[in-house]
Amino acid sequence: DTEVTQTPKHLVMGMTNKKSLKCEQHMGHRAMYWYKQKAKKPPELMFVYSYEKLSINESVPSRFSPECPNSSLLNLHLHALQPEDSALYLCASSQDGGGNSPLHFGNGTRLTVT
Amino acid sequence: QKEVEQDPGPLSVPEGAIVSLNCTYSNSAFQYFMWYRQYSRKGPELLMYTYSSGNKEDGRFTAQVDKSSKYISLFIRDSQPSDSATYLCAMGGGGFKTIFGAGTRLFVKA
């Protein structure tokens, strides 16, 4: 088991649904990330929060909406997704709020959009 | 040219073999280097992290960084079937953007 916990493990949603992915870490890390990973590809950065503030948005479509309620929690709100958004969504954290430390990943949420 | 090049394999070896996984990179600004192991349907797991040129050993794993050649390696000694996974090299230069290699799929045959 990892120290970054993601729920749910699997999610199937229709294109008109609204759902949320959740991530939690209790390592005291100051930066948290959302990544998207397609099969046989490396993770792609979506968003970075540092000290609970959004630092990076990699031009992600607005149907993905991140939220960082506190230093331990990170959410990703999903709305009106497309089938091509089906992927493994990974949460990660790093100790350094400036990003100069390695990423620690959760096991992801496998999302299928029908 | 990609910032990080990694042969996607697959690489198939017999149990007990020494495995060598490699990445090259083009950006001299990279300061720290990582290897991740990813099992099917799991998230990447941090195996090794190093901040300088040279070797770092942890059990059966040795990470090697040669900044002058822009080349990093991961060696796995006495490989086991449980080592079968995708291995991702990754590097960063300060800031939040970690650059990943494509990942090498490794199969260790019993």
Image (tube, rainbow, N blue to C red):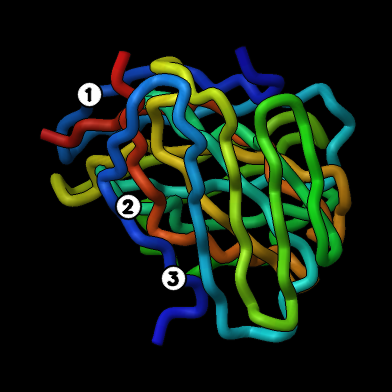
Instruction: Return the residue at label 2.
Output: A41
Q: Quick check: do tags 2 and 1 share a chain? A: yes
Using the image, determine if residue B28 lies above or below residue B82.
below
Which of A44 and A82 lies nearest the eye of the viewer?
A44
Instruction: Return the residue at label 3.
Output: B5
Tell me the kind of residue under disc 2: Lys
Q: Nearer the viewer, mark 3 or mark 2?
A: 3
Q: Is residue B60 left or right of residue B53?
A: left
- Secondary structure at badge 3 equals strand
Q: Nearer the viewer, mark 2 or mark 1?
A: 2
Image quarter in which the C terminus of chain A is found: top left
- Which residue is found at the position 88% from the left and 51% from the top? A96
Q: Pinpoint residue B104: horizontal percent, then vertical percent.
A: 38, 48
Q: Pinpoint residue A20: horizontal percent, then vertical percent.
A: 44, 30
Q: Quick one: label 2, few (<14), some, or many (20+) residues within 10 Å?
A: some
Instruction: Return the residue at label 1.
Output: A12
- Secondary structure at badge 1 equals strand
Q: Is residue B103 left or right of residue A40?
A: right
Tell me the kind of residue under disc 1: Val
Q: Quick check: do tags 3 and 2 share a chain? A: no
Read off the chain for label 1. A
Which of B42 and A74 lies nearest the eye of the viewer?
B42
- Which residue is found at the position 21% from the left and 28% from the top? A13
Between the residue at mark 3 and the residue at mark 2, the CA separation in whole angstroms equals 13 Å
- Which residue is found at the position 77% from the left and 63% from the top? B32
Quadrant in which residue B82 is drawn: top left
- Which residue is found at the position 29% from the left and 31% from the top? A111
